[in-house]
Image: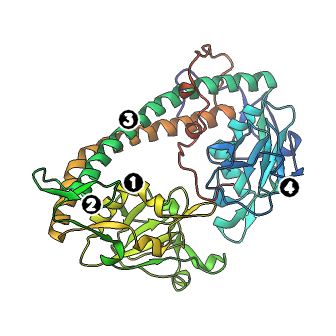
């Protein structure tokens, strides 16, 4: 997708590498190692602030980060360095650091040499470079693929003159600021719709839809009154069992295949009521090493910042050990349970155990207090909820589609500019307005892929 105000350069030449295609004749095409040095200084997180390398950029270490006990064995990062996670299961986790600090050894720290660091940021965050970076790595299976500096330093990268790099940065900063502002406004609208939707659900699963029904104290302070004929009981009284999943032993590719058996992990959960297809799927060999759960199993994340996220499996499935699998009995229907659990998610954290992360195991899950009401009433409540929230769901999906189109345009624009497919040297750039932080262009969560959730284990 090409911006209407842009046009190609007048003359191009073929380059040695295909990932960026032809380049403007006056641009250089050099090995990455000629413009970036690897910073390998070992430091302690006691002296240098621990940082997390995420898809949204480099940030102070997240509470959800996978932490090791070896805090004295980390890599130094200085402001202006570019840091990239070398592992394929953290694909796209990288960014220009605005901090002095330290990162885990799995990351590569690059020190720019005679390169505008922000230009490097845009170049290395482009989808085409991300794919080329991992193409140059190695490993036994796609999800456990690693690229080292000695491999990436031989990647040929496009390098315009420093004044041209400066202009590219100014142009992209300006354009992305406007795009980010648009996306932020749309996301605020989505948040408002979700809040209104959740209010309907909360009312339905804690008070019912009959405004004339007599109420009584629930005996739970935060819940307040409930319909007189409802009873609050521990979850274990309404379900068959609560189990957990597992991971096949070892990382051999024989356990996984592109189209196989669903194996859910926390990254598969969103706001949908049902879980359909997992990102990673098991082969028959992998399937033989894990617990298998029936269709209609309620899956709830039991650890970390996403603890309490919950959905229903559409078909037979498996899951990893971070998920609690709840098998409902005839006393409670899965949809009602999911809606109720989502309504009280913040209170679930209160009963979790804490080490570095909140953990809700099977025993704690069984102790969660839930309403015991006739199944026919549960079905009516679920039906009424689905009817009531349909208009909100439609509105949310429409806005998400709009955001998706804008993000595609943004990704394409960045790639075209940093690889010289369009010329921005003579484009007039408005002086940035003085705005508050919430309207600025430095919103990493919106800058490249629209990823707003931090993955469990990001370093």
Query: Depth check: 8 or 307 in front?
Result: 307
Query: Depth check: 394 or 321 in front?
Result: 321
In this view, 52 is above or below 279:
above
Q: Are marks 2 and 4 in contact (CB under 8 Å)?
A: no
Identify the residue under disc 4: 150
Q: Please name which of the two marks, 3 or 2, marks the residue nearer to the observer.
A: 2
Q: Position of residue 230 (x, y in %)?
A: 20, 65
Identify the residue under disc 1: 271
Q: Position of residue 110 (x, y in %)?
A: 82, 44
Q: Position of residue 127 (x, y in %)?
A: 62, 45
Name the residue rendered at 90%, 50% in the picture: 41
In 3D space, how far apart are the residues under numbered discs 1 and 3 (Cα atoms)? 16 Å
The mark nearer the N terminus, 3 or 2, is 3
User: Can the viewer see residue 308?
Assistant: no
Q: Is residue 297 left or right of residue 255?
A: left
Identify the residue under disc 3: 189
The image quarter in which residue 122 lies = top right
Query: Depth check: 71 or 456 in front?
Result: 71
In 3D space, how far apart are the residues under numbered discs 2 and 4 (Cα atoms)? 63 Å
């Amino acid at each position: 997708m090409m911006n209407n105000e842009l046009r190609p350069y007048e003359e191009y030449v073929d380059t040695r590498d295909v990932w960026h295609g032809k380049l403007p004749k006056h641009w250089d095409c050099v090995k990455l190692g000629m413009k970036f040095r690897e910073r390998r200084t070992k430091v302690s997180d006691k002296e240098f602030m621990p940082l997390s390398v995420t898809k949204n950029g480099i940030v102070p270490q997240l509470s959800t980060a996978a932490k090791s006990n070896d805090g004295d064995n980390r890599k130094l990062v200085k402001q202006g360095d570019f840091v990239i996670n070398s592992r394929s299961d953290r694909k796209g986790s990288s960014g220009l650091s605005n901090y002095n600090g330290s990162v885990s050894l799995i990351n590569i720290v690059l020190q720019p040499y005679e390169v505008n660091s922000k230009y490097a940021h845009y170049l290395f965050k482009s989808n085409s470079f991300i794919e080329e970076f991992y193409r140059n790595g190695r490993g036994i299976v796609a999800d456990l693929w690693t690229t080292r500096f000695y491999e990436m330093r031989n990647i040929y990268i496009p390098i315009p003159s420093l004044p041209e790099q400066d202009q590219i940065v100014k142009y992209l900063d300006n354009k992305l600021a406007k795009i980010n502002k648009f996306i932020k406004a749309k996301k605020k609208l989505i948040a408002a719709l979700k809040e209104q939707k959740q209010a309907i659900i909360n009312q339905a699963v804690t008070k019912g839809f009959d405004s004339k029904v007599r109420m009584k104290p629930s005996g739970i302070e935060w819940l307040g009154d409930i319909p007189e004929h409802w009873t609050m009981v521990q979850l274990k009284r309404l379900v068959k069992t609560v189990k957990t999943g597992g991971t096949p032993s070892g990382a051999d590719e024989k356990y996984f295949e592109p189209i196989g058996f669903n194996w859910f992990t926390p990254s598969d959960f969103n706001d949908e009521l049902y879980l359909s297809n997992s990102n990673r799927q098991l082969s028959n060999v992998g399937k033989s090493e894990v617990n298998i759960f029936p269709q209609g199993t309620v899956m709830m994340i039991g650890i970390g910042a996403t603890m309490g996220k919950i959905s229903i499996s559409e078909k037979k499935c498996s899951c990893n050990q971070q998920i609690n699998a709840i098998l409902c009995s005839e006393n409670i229907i899965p949809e009602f349970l999911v809606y109720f659990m989502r309504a009280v998610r913040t209170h679930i954290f209160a009963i979790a155990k804490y080490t570095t992360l909140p953990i809700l195991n099977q025993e704690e899950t069984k102790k969660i207090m839930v309403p015991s009401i006739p199944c026919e009433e549960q079905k009516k409540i679920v039906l009424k909820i689905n009817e009531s929230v349909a208009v909100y769901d439609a509105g949310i999906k429409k806005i998400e589609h709009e955001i998706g189109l804008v993000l595609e345009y943004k990704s394409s624009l960045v790639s075209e500019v940093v690889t010289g497919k369009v010329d921005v040297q003579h484009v007039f750039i408005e002086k940035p307005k003085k705005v508050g932080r919430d309207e600025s262009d430095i919103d990493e969560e919106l800058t490249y892929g629209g990823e707003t959730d931090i993955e469990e284990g990001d370093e």
